[in-house]
Image (cartoon, helix red, strand yellow):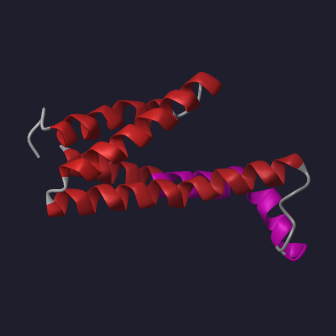
Amino acid sequence: MANAASWFMFCLGIAHIVFGLVKFAGPVADAVSAGLIGQFAEPEVRRTAFWFLVFGPLLMLAGHVGIHAVAKGDLSLLKILGIYAFAIAVLGVAAFPQSPFWAPLLVAPVLIAVGYGWIAL
C-alpha cells in the first residue's frame, strides 16, 4: 500500500507539470521568448506558473523517496515523508479548499500508518 501511495505522489508530480504547462502555456512561452532568466517575477501569472511548475518535481521527489523507503523497508523515512506531506496538504486545503491538495491529504495518512507499523509494508 505504501508503494502505491508513493507512486501516486510521483505520478501526481508528473500530472502537476503537464497540467501546468497546458494551463500556463502562454505565460511560460512568453517568459522563455523573453530570455527566461529573470522573466518570472512579473506579471503575477508568470510567478504563479513558475511556482506551480516547480511543485511538480518536488512531488516527484517525494514519490521517489517513498519508493526508495519501501524498497529498503525504511519505515521511519515513510513516516517522515507522510508527516511532511500531511502538513503541506492540511495547509494547502486550508488556504485553497477547492484545490487538489485533498489528494495528498488522503495519501499521507497511509504513509504515516505504514511508518508507524499500523499497516504492513
Determine which quarter of the picture holds residue 1: top left
Give the extent of the magenta segment. 13-35
Determine which quarter of the picture holds residue 84: top left
Residue 76 in view (yes/no):
yes
- Residue 7: percent from left, percent from top: 31, 54
- Residue 114 sits above or below residue 7 on the image: above
The residue nearer to you, when weighing 48 against 25, is 48
Q: Check residue 1 for magenta coloring.
A: no
Q: Check residue 21 for magenta coloring.
A: yes
Residue drawn where x is 81% and y is 58% of the image: 26
> Hey, which residue is sitting farthest front in the picture?
76
- Residue 12: percent from left, percent from top: 44, 49
Residue 21 relative to residue 116: left or right: right
Residue 97 in view (yes/no):
no
Residue drawn where x is 26% and y is 59% of the image: 67
Residue drawn where x is 23% and y is 58% of the image: 69
- Residue 34 sits above or below residue 98 on the image: below
Residue 37 relative to residue 20: left or right: right
> Hey, which residue is sitting farthest bottom in the picture?
35
Q: Main secondary structure of the magenta part?
A: helix
